[in-house]
Amino acid sequence: MTIRHRGSGYQIDVSVTREGRKTRYREQFTGSKIEAQAREWQIRAALAEGRDPSPMTATADEETLAEAYHKTFERFWDGTRSETVARSNASIIQDALGPATPLKDVGVEQIDALVSTWRAKGHTSSTINRRLTSINKVLSHAVDRGTLDIKPKISYLKETAHRVRYFTPEERSLIVSYWSTRGDQKWSDYFTILLDTGMRPSELDQIETRDINLESGSVRIWKTKTDRPRTVPLTQRALAAFTRQTLNERPFAFSNTAARTKKWNAIREELGLMDDPDFVSYACRHDCATRLLQATGNIVLVQNWLGHTDIKMTMRYAHLVPDTLSAGLSALEKQNAQEEGPPELLRDVAALRSVPQTSGTKEERPGQLHPQRESA
């Protein structure tokens, strides 16, 4: 066994054969098992390349990984919506590589070791890529500041396409009515608004009463994932739902992840969809986008409605609505009919096309080369 639990940490025992010679290295590691596994891969990579695998410690004039993360955090992540996730990624990477590690010693080998460990633990490609983005930002900022000469190339994993779940009319009807028929109108209003605005749950949770314009029938979303505010018009039932909940400064302050999951699971159970991993409250956003595209065929409208900065995100929904292509075909046929003229003209053109072509003379067929000149 390469890793054994010893005292408050783990003993790492690695043997590598290089150029016919076996090298063994043993180290006592303090940290979690996942971090010990990452350290094991670092040791193996070092031994395979003939390097000293001893833990690295920065000198007084070298910037450590922890210092680089601190400066990057202050510059880019502090006070933003992604602050919590950024702190989590920073902690995971520093614990794995060692906060005192010189930043210049964080190379492809160390990063590949982290990826191998995370994949072995079953982390998804998207989760691993978010962590790689974190360390990539730190390294890029160090290059910009002049404390790092060159940044190692980071190769991201290929992410599988996410399944887009939208609802049947029966599912949608139950989502809207389930909690109101049980005397809990606030959660019925909550899910109704998600369905008809396409807001992310995190966006709806932060809505304040002053953001809702009951006269124009719209809601202004200030706190968004992309930090780009947008205004969304409200359907009659979404407007009624907001109107019922405007007594408090934040109409949906009662919502949080745990409460929302509990209420949504009751709907899942009623529909017999507890085993459907894609039937989640976030699917209300997918459902809204799909219905908008079905009704309008306008992908740019859907992009602006959802607040996507990149239309590639919106294009996920296009393949779900094949009827939009039929609408395009109808538009082309209508335009063609207008440009080609009345039916009698089309019959005349068809008749001309059916007349046999003759060889004729040069004057009769100016587009044909003279045979003698052609051979020349």
Image (cartoon, grey):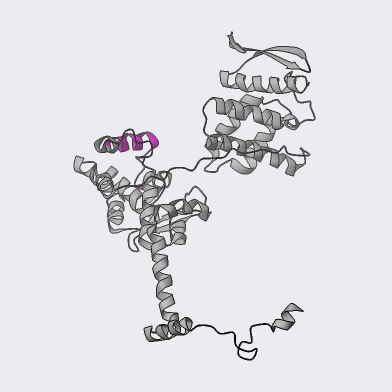
Q: Position of residue 97 (x, y in %)?
A: 66, 26
Residue at point 36%, 42% (across, down): 281
State left or right for residue 164 relative to residue 140. Answer: left
Does residue 97 appear in the picture of this structure?
yes
State left or right for residue 192 relative to residue 61. Answer: left
Magenta-drawn stretch contains 251: yes
Magenta-drawn stretch contains 133: no
Look at the picture and state if 26 lies above or below 88: above
Q: Nearer the viewer, residue 150 or 100?
A: 150
Q: Position of residue 326 (x, y in %)?
A: 39, 63
Q: Nearer the viewer, residue 262 or 152?
A: 152
Does residue 297 appear in the picture of this structure?
no
Q: Position of residue 122 (x, y in %)?
A: 51, 27
Q: Nearer the viewer, residue 76 or 307?
A: 307
State left or right for residue 78 relative to residue 251. Answer: right
Q: Which residues are magenta?
A: 249-266
Q: Position of residue 311 (x, y in %)?
A: 51, 55
Quadrant containing the C terminus in the rendered view: bottom right
Q: Quadrant of residue 328?
A: bottom left
Q: Quadrant of residue 95?
A: top right
Quadrant containing the N terminus in the rendered view: top right
Look at the picture and state if 253 lies above or below 66: below
Most distant residue in the top direction: 7
Q: Quadrant of residue 214?
A: bottom left
Q: How many marks?
A: 0
Residue at point 78%, 21% (across, down): 50
Residue at point 55%, 39% (across, down): 83
